[in-house]
Amino acid sequence: MQLFIDAFHHQQCFSYPTEAVFGLGCDPLSEKAMMDILSLKSRPVEKGVILIAGSVEQLDSFIELDKIAEANQEKIFASWPGPFTWLLPKSAKTPSWVSGNSDLVAVRVTNHPLVKEMCAAVNSPMVSTSANPAGKEPARTEQQVVDYFGSELLVVEGALGEQQQPSTIINGLTLETLRS
């Protein structure tokens, strides 16, 4: 865990197991680490990434809940923790390298024990994007992460969750499901 904490605080990216696949992550406020992730994935910054958190409170400074209807807020909170990513109005603190070309930011509160522990250790959400170069299948093992990105990238050891598919993505303003 200490290697992860050091990487997080020293603007480095890392890989870690999530509910369904290995993810690439970093401190969402580190532009350097985020650019490293985008370079590894050959992913344009305009697409944005997900913020994964261990609690709703860790997302408070990145989202503006007051812009969401109360009925929609109830649906959002009822789905967490769990494999549901919501597109919510971003706050002024949310960097454009996280949200991409959108006024919304993708956020999820996880029930994965290791990811919850990681978020608690740094008292912050983390960037979460699948560990794979563009056009390749997401890594489902530590070895696949190393095969894709080399042995220099820190891989936090742990088991994947029980999800078979990536999280469902829902627009928190319209309740439209964008990925199921």
Image (cartoon, rainbow, N blue to C red):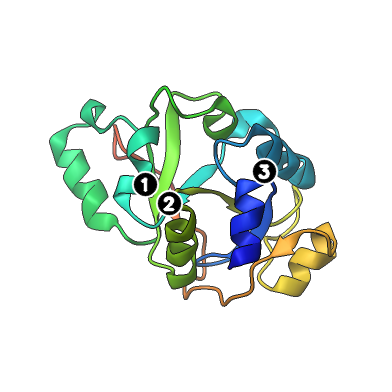
Q: Residue at x 68, y 50 (%)?
A: 13
Residue 92 falls left or right of residue 40: left
Q: Which mark is residue 11?
A: 3
- Give the spatial CA distance, label 3 vs label 1: 19 Å
The residue shown at (47%, 60%) is: 121
Q: Which residue is mark 1?
A: 58
Res 123 label: 2
Classify residue 180 by image quadrant: bottom left
Quadrant of the drawing holding the N terminus: bottom right
Give the residue type at disc 1.
Gln
Frontmost of labels 1 and 2 is 2
Quadrant of residue 88 in the image?
Answer: top left
Image x and y of residue 147, in percent: 83, 66
Residues at marks 1 and 2, CA–CA distance in whole angstroms: 7 Å
Secondary structure category for the residue under label 1? helix
Q: Residue 130, which numbered label?
A: none
Precedes in sequence: disc 3 or disc 1: 3
Q: Nearer the viewer, mark 3 or mark 1?
A: 3
